[in-house]
Amino acid sequence: MDKNLKRMATMHRMQVKGLELFYQNGYYNTSVDDILKSLSLSKGAFYHHFQSKEDFFISIIQNLIVQKVYAVLIEPVEKCDNPFRAIESCFENALETAEHNNMDFGFILSNFMTEFNRRNPEISKYLKDIYKVWEVNLVSIFQKAKTDGYLERHVDSEAVATYLISSYIGIRTLMVEGNCKALRYQYMQQLKAYFKSIEQSNLVS
């Protein structure tokens, strides 16, 4: 294998394991030694690829967390004709996946945003940038929905985006310790009712 490809494969393996440990235990409760032990690597191997634990985590944000959020919550609703049905399907799929995940510790982005808030401005900025991309994407979708005749023109697109993000983060947090199936069902029923209240009247059956 080409040396550069081998290096990239090693870094990816380290990032995947690092994200797993940070997600499960928290960034500040996970040491470099914990990561090395789980990977059977030496400190020299770690510092050959990353300058510090912080540098390692930033690489995880850039290479894994961005991709996860985009693949689960952004890409599925892009370029869809009816944004309401697309978001319903997207959220339903994401929540069902979480429901059947025995190692669910909540929504990964919000977990880390909370942990780093006021503790590490640089990492917080990277995480908030992902949040902003998600928010801007939703706002754009709802602005287009007004033009396409799906969303009532008087509705504030930014307010809808804020509501969706905050409610999704909230239900993911509750599902960690609650009855996942019941919570998912209740949330989706209320989400659909909310969408009906802001859809163009001619679309609501």
Image: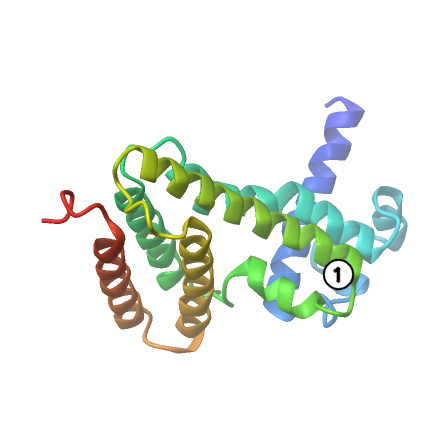
Q: Report whether 198 appears left or right of 69.
A: left
What percent of the width, then of the height, locates residue 180? 33, 70
From this view, report whether residue 174 is shown above or below residue 146.
below
What percent of the width, then of the height, locates residue 205? 9, 49
**In front of the other: 99 or 162:** 162
From this view, report whether residue 151 is shown above or below residue 108.
above
Q: Residue at x 66, y 62 (%)?
A: 22
Q: Report whether 97 appears left or right of 29.
A: left
Q: Which image quarter holds the N terminus?
A: top right
Q: Quadrant of residue 76?
A: top left
Q: Residue at x 31, y 54 (%)?
A: 92
**In front of the other: 85 or 201:** 201
Q: Amino acid at mark 1?
A: Lys
Q: Which residue is labeled 1 in the image? A: 37
Q: Residue at x 81, y 57 (%)?
A: 53
The answer to whether residue 185 is visible is: yes
**In front of the other: 36 or 127:** 127
Q: Report whether 204 appears left or right of 161.
A: left
Q: Report whether 138 appears left or right of 199.
A: right
From this view, report whether residue 123 is shown above or below residue 183.
above
Q: Quadrant of residue 20?
A: bottom right
